[in-house]
Amino acid sequence: MNICVIGTGYVGLVSGVCFSDIGNKVTCVDIDENKISNLKKGIIPIYEPGLEELVLKNIKENRLSFTTQLDKALDEADVVLIAVGTPPKENGEADLRFVEAVATSIGKNLNGYKVIVTKSTVPVGTGKWIKGIIEKEAGHSNFDVASNPEFLREGSAIYDTMNMERAVIGVESDKAKEVLTELHKPFNTNIVVADIETAEMIKYAANAFLATKISFINEIANICELVGADVTKVAEGMGYDNRIGKAFLAAGIGYGGSCFPKDTNALINIAANVGYNLRIVKDVENVNAMQRFRVYDKVKEAFNGELEGKKLAVLGLAFKPNTDDMRAAPSIDVIPKLLEDGADVIAYDPVAMANAKREIANLNTVNSYEEAVQGADAVIVLTDWKEFKDLDLADLKKKLKQPVLIDGRNMFDLNQMADLGYYYASIGRRTVNKL
Ligand code: UDX
């Protein structure tokens, strides 16, 4: 099939390259000339494992190309994927400015039947709204709109797409259903066909549910601390129950990133707009907003409330490992609090430091973990990078002024930390060697 993908952000780029890799001819379109000229050379604007190799491979095999000219790309396309950003507005609603602009351009340039698919996460009802815009601009309705939400995770986006657990296809016509089912056949996956509103809702409900699991286990963690239980064991014991499942029960400093905070908020707004008070998801947000400060509280506790002049090595800045994405990262809230208290914060992240410097004022970074921890009064883990998981903890201890480790991600074994003589505070577990 011939596919035109509009928007070369995370979703657009990953979908585009994966659809090309399974044998389609894909043209990715963006208005950003610099981005497109870089992409043509295989220079990728985001950090995503495996993406660069796959882009280069498919450019070479003539299945993938990049352009700023929407009209030309549209000309030959059977399927058009809208994958532009839907950033949150001040009030939490999704901003559909870019989607509107793209729909208008599609309408102006429509030359024959196409299936126009929304990949961006958009409020329920947007599919119909897009249809109206295109119809008005094109002056005819020889096209179908559809919804095909994306469930990929940053850091494993290629894997998630190539091994998708389901494809959700929201359609209004049999023709669109056939085209999109055919397109997803090579993925050999479960296909859920629904109407457009339902497909749009599936995406929000799925993300809000995952966020709920995280906030739920974080609250359980907070109780575990008070009653002397271990949340990692609690999660293990719960997770063997298939009805619950093991995934997304890792307690920590709460979720960040570009999706969960935005989508939970948008869902609350979608509900409010139809007069429904979405209590559970509101509380999920409240718990999440509070959870990141538990790490800060634990640092304070370790030093009896006095952080002035303490050298604190922060390991990890990105909202999660394998990404340089800083959107809604807990570090954005935690580090300024430490700085306000007069601590000397030295941060290290394998890939997110440049982005972090734009988000966090007066952030001091160093180029290696060793430099960060040398002579530190405490180490604070904010992102669960494998590099940190694999640390030689005995060696780390020698580098520190004091063996204090505050772990927002439950990376290390309690008994091992106790044996090594660390003061070790984590989330939902007892603090070892408490002074
Ligand atoms: C998420 C969804 O997983 C994906 O399906 C959707 O399309 C976009 O949003 P992403 O934001 O890339 O993907 O990251 P994910 O790996 O899901 O993690 C989200 C956040 O939750 C991270 O901050 C992570 O640290 C946190 N998390 C995740 C936990 O705190 N505990 C867990 O058990 C799992």
Image: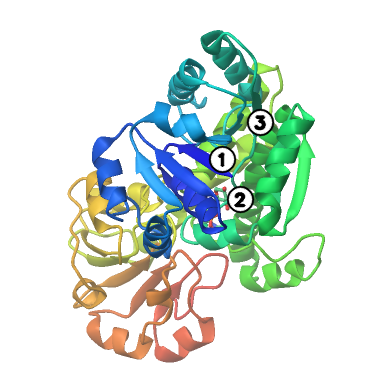
* Residue at image coords 35%, 57%: 47
Vertical relation: 240 (above or below) 364: below
User: Can you tell me whether the CB of the residue at mark 1 lies under 8 Å from the nearest atom of ligand 1?
Assistant: no
| Dot 1: element | helix
Residue 363 horizontal/vertical position (percent): 20, 53
Q: Between marks 3 and 2, how big is the CA–CA gap?
A: 32 Å
Residue bearing mark 3: 146
Q: Which amino acid does label 1 sit on?
A: Glu
According to the picture, the residue beneath numbered tag 1 turns out to be 285
Mark 1 or 3: in front is: 3
The three-letter amino acid code for the residue at tag 2 is Ser
Residue beneath disc 2 = 215
Q: Quadrant of the C terminus?
A: bottom left
In percent of the image, x 73 and y 67: which residue is there? 239
Considering only vertical position in the picture, is 225 above or below 270? below
Q: Which of marks 1 and 3 is nearer the N terminus?
A: 3
Q: What element carries label 2?
A: helix
Contact check, label 1 and label 2, Cβ < 8 Å: yes
Q: How crowded is the residue under tag 1: few (<14 C-alpha within 10 Å), some, or many (20+)?
A: many
| Residue type for callout 3 | Ala
Q: Where is residue 243 in the image (x, y as percent from the top left)?
A: 82, 60
Name the disc covering residue 18, or none. none
Q: Is residue 405 visible to us here?
A: yes
Say which of 65 and 16 sits in front: 65
In the figure, residue 234 lies in which quadrant?
Answer: bottom right
Distance of label 1 from label 3 (alpha carbons)? 30 Å
